Structures are given as C-alpha cells and as structure tokens.
Image (cartoon, rainbow, N blue to C red):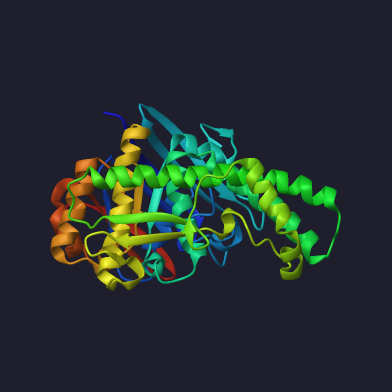
Amino acid sequence: MPRLALRALKLSYFRSHRAAHLQLDARPVALYGANGAGKTNILEAVSLLSPGRGLRRATPADMARAPERIGWKVAAEMESLVDLHEVATSAQGDASRLVEIDGKPAPQVALGRIARITWLVPAMDRLWTEGAAERRRFLDRLVLGFDPSHAEAVLGYEKAMRERNRLLRDQSRDAGWYAALEGQMADHGARITAARLACLDRLAAAQGGARTAFPAADLTLLDGDVPATAPATDDLAQALAASRPADLRAGRTLVGPHRADLRAIYAAKGIEARNASTGEQKALLVSLVLASARALAEDFGAPPILLLDEVAAHLDEARRAALFDEICALGAQAWMTGTGPELFDALGDRASYVEVSEADGLSHLEQKGMP
C-alpha cells in the first residue's frame, strides 16, 4: 500500500533537543508531556521536511539550540509512496538552510515533489477573526499539497513585488522598469490565483463527498469584496499599470493576489466562520485539514503527513475520537501533541507513543507502548 510516512527522525542541536532519535512505523504518533517540554519543536522539525519556513516561520538561526549555537540538523528516513528517501535539512548560524535528498544537495522546492506535509497549530485558532494575511498563508499551504510549483510562483511574485514597491517608495517614474516588473507579477499572480481557486474546488468536492463528524465550510476566495476569478495575465498586468498613480501615493502595491482573502461560511448554520463559537471555528479548521488529506490521498497517491499541535484543546471527547478514527481510516501518519496520554486513549494501539520531558534545559524522548 503506498504511504507517506517518516520511518526515522533524528534531531541534532535543534531547539531544545541536543540529540533525539525516533524509529517509527506508519502509524500516527502521539507526543505527550508537560508544556515547554519540547513537543512542538519536534513538529517544527518535521515541518521543515517540506518547502518553506516551517510551522513557526522562524529564521534558521532561531532554530539552533542555545547556548551552543553550533548549527542544527534534521534528518529523516521518509517512505514516499513506494520509495524510501534519506532527507535532511540543516543550517549554520545565519546562513540559509540547506536541503539534501538521498545524499545530494537539492532546492527546497524538491521536497514538495516527494512529501506533502500539512499542519494545524494553536495560533491558527484565531484564523477566522484576524487579518487576511494569515488566511492567505493557510490557503497557500493547502495549495502546496496539490501543486508544489505554487511555492515558486509565490516566491517569484513576492520578489517582483518587493522591487516594484521599492520603486514606488523612491517615487520612481520609470515606466519601463514598472512594466517589466508588472509583467513578472502578472505571470506569477495569474498562476497563484488559478491554483488557489483549483484548491478550493478540490476541498469542496472532498468535503461534499465525505461522511464526517466535522462541519463543512463553504469557502470563497475574495478579491476585495467580490469573489475572485482567475485573471488572464494581460488583465492583471493592465490592472497593475492602471494602479500606479494610487500605488505611488500609498508607497506600495494595492492590487494583486497578495490582497486576496479567504471567506468561510459554517455551512450547516449559514454563518461566517468569524461569528462561530471558538469550538466551531476549531472544528472547521480540522474539517479543512481532513478534506485536504482526503483529496491529496486521491491526487498524490497517499494522504499527507499531518502535524496537529494541541489539536484536542477545543475538541470534546466525542469529536476527538472521531478525529482519530478519520486519521486512521485515511492511513495518515499524524503527529499529535498533548499534555497527557489520556488525551489519546481513543487511539489505543493504532498509534505510536512518545513521552517528551525536560530536565536540565534539555528535552528527552522516550518511546513507549500504549500508556
């Protein structure tokens, strides 16, 4: 059976872990221990086996264990469909992090070709009530699962936009420079919006065709106050050109996919997610992560690795058990954290268990049978 799972994980001088080694099978992994013991650090390490800055969006220097600050490394044996890969990422000091796949240097985007990793962390509990930037970031992480090249489009768009914003701040009137940068932004931007809309279509289908204990969300990508449509490259370039006078006054780019927002409606109640209860908002997020996993299982051939930090915080016992059942039915390797082993009682022997403790400023891992 094709799977996506870590078979081994090694950490060296990463965050609170001077050295850690886990041998795993494809089952979910339940990490439990006191707050501050280092559980989330393990999830962050796993998140770095995918493109991007990881679940905390930290700089490489911030991930190095203090006080040594001698650099860090995360290495894993990854089962990806029918292949096994040796994957590692590391950094020294303030240098950019490096990636190796099967012993050879590789760009970060190459990780997206062999792995799909999705996460849900407590900071996302406020996703529906805070600014649009976090919702775009959440959506783009889901898009990456379906289209790993999305990362290149986003990076290309942001790089061109930074240059254009610099011209705007300098009050430059060089039409040639603007046109060149706007052409790049339009090319990347059209791809970004098309990929976001395609992802929402896949999520809608995955939610609509599932029997689940979690509520469905009706999702809309917004361009301002109206639903977004996939723009032609030329149309976006023209919109950017037309916006130059207003952008010069503002000192920044005011149109484009970097201004998009994601609106969610709690389908069963017909209310916006931001007006739902805290528990309902959490359940909607879980629903979207599960829908993404179901869709990816069809598209990629295996469900993604799921990183669910303190996922039980706003789930009652029944929903928690339902979540575990859905994860196991999917065959996903979900890494889940909690303060005590009792939170994972409903998993039984369907999971691997790791106790995380802290002593003398160091995190310690102990693999266990059923607690």
**In front here: 189 or 152?**
189
Which residue is farthest top? 82
**In front here: 87 or 221?**
221
- The percent coordinates of residue 42 (x first, y second) are 40, 56
**In front here: 320 or 45?**
320
Query: What quarter of the picture does the N terminus occupy?
Result: top left
Q: Is residue 327 visible?
A: yes
Q: Is residue 140 left or right of residue 286?
A: right
Residue 246 quadrant: bottom right
- The percent coordinates of residue 264 (x first, y second) are 36, 60
Please tell me which residue is depicted at 56% across the width and 42% down the height of the picture.
191
Residue 174 quadrant: bottom right
Q: Is residue 236 above or below residue 269?
A: above
Q: Is residue 69 visible?
A: no
Residue 180 quadrant: top right
Query: What quarter of the picture does the C terminus occupy?
Result: bottom left
Image label count: 0
Q: Is residue 288 above or below residue 83?
A: below
- The percent coordinates of residue 234 (x first, y second) are 66, 42
Please tell me which residue is depicted at 32% across the width and 34% down the height of the picture.
298
- The percent coordinates of residue 345 (x first, y second) are 14, 59
**In front here: 72 or 98?**
98
Please tell me which residue is depicted at 48% across the width and 59% down the height of the picture.
226
Please tell me which residue is depicted at 54% across the width and 32% down the height of the picture.
103
Q: Is residue 107 left or right of residue 118?
A: right
